[in-house]
């Protein structure tokens, strides 16, 4: 990702903002694997700190629908989408899609991640409750228009999966490895299908 240079970018939780570089981290951001990610919905702000070797990056939260600068696009096959996990069953994960290619959508859309589309591992070995939890923010690829009620999504690529989650204790988590995230407060680990690296 190229260094961030403007204040017009809108961020969603779990979105990669930039390499750590000479940035200092402010409100609504966290550091993982030498990269800075958003932990809030909001407008990205980049400001000089007075130190010539440091620039402050933060996410200014917005709360109203109007402030979120939505677009009226609909997801298409091949799109990368961001959504919130609504329900996890033994056979599928139900997702509420709210953004596509880092642009918020005016309306949310229903998405489904079926068991064989979670990872390249044999689906017989996968427990979806160890991959996703209700409330997780995920990145996925649209692989089919599915049926009239939902898009079919895939998280089989290593960069797709959970990109933001809170722990059982209620604190933000960071990626620990491909199948675990770690609580920033308690250091407890929880299983997830982690979206690692860049798109």
Image (spheres, rainbow, N blue to C red):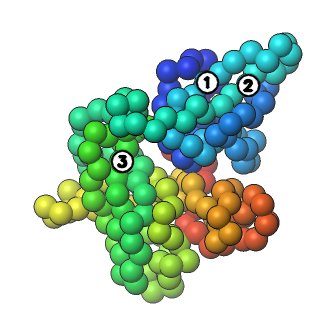
Left or right side of 55 for 179 = left
Q: Which residue is mark 3?
A: 98
116 or 131: nearer the viewer: 131
Within 10 Å of the Cα at label 1, are there few (<14), some (14-19), or many (20+) other Cα atoms? some
72 or 194: nearer the viewer: 72
Q: SS class of the residue under badge 1? A: strand
Q: Is residue 197 above or below residue 48?
A: below
> Residue 92 at what x, y percent from top left?
36, 75
Residue 117 can be seen, yes or no:
no
Left or right side of 154 for 41 = right
Instruction: Count how many numbered circles sit on residues in the image.
Output: 3
Which residue in the rendered view is the most extreme toward the front?
Answer: 64
Whole-number angstrom distance, CA of label 2 to CA of label 1: 8 Å
The residue that appears at 79% across and 66% down in the rendered structure is: 187
Q: Which residue is mark 1?
A: 45
Cβ atoms at labels 2 and 1 below 8 Å apart: yes
Q: Which residue is mark 2?
A: 56
Q: Quadrant of the N terminus?
A: top right
183 or 33: nearer the viewer: 183
Cβ atoms at labels 1 and 3 below 8 Å apart: no
Whole-number angstrom distance, CA of label 1 to CA of label 3: 22 Å
Q: SS class of the residue under badge 3? A: strand
């Amino acid at each position: 990702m190229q260094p961030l240079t403007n204040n017009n970018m809108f961020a969603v939780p779990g979105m990669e903002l930039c390499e750590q570089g000479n940035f200092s981290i402010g409100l609504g951001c966290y550091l993982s694997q030498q990269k800075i990610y958003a932990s809030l919905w909001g407008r990205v702000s980049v400001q000089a700190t007075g130190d010539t070797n440091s620039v402050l990056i933060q996410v200014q939260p917005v709360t109203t629908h109007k402030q979120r600068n939505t677009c009226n696009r609909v997801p298409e096959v091949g799109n990368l989408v961001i959504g919130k996990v609504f329900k996890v069953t033994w056979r599928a994960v139900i997702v509420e899609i709210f953004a596509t290619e880092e642009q918020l959508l005016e309306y949310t859309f229903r998405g489904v991640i079926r068991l064989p589309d979670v990872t390249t591992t044999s689906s017989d070995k996968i427990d979806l409750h160890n991959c996703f939890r209700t409330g997780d923010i995920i990145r996925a690829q649209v692989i089919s228009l599915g049926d009239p009620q939902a898009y079919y999504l895939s998280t089989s690529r290593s960069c797709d999966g959970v990109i933001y989650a809170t722990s059982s204790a209620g604190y933000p988590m960071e990626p620990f490895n491909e199948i675990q995230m770690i609580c920033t407060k308690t250091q407890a680990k929880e299983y997830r299908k982690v979206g690692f690296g860049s798109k």
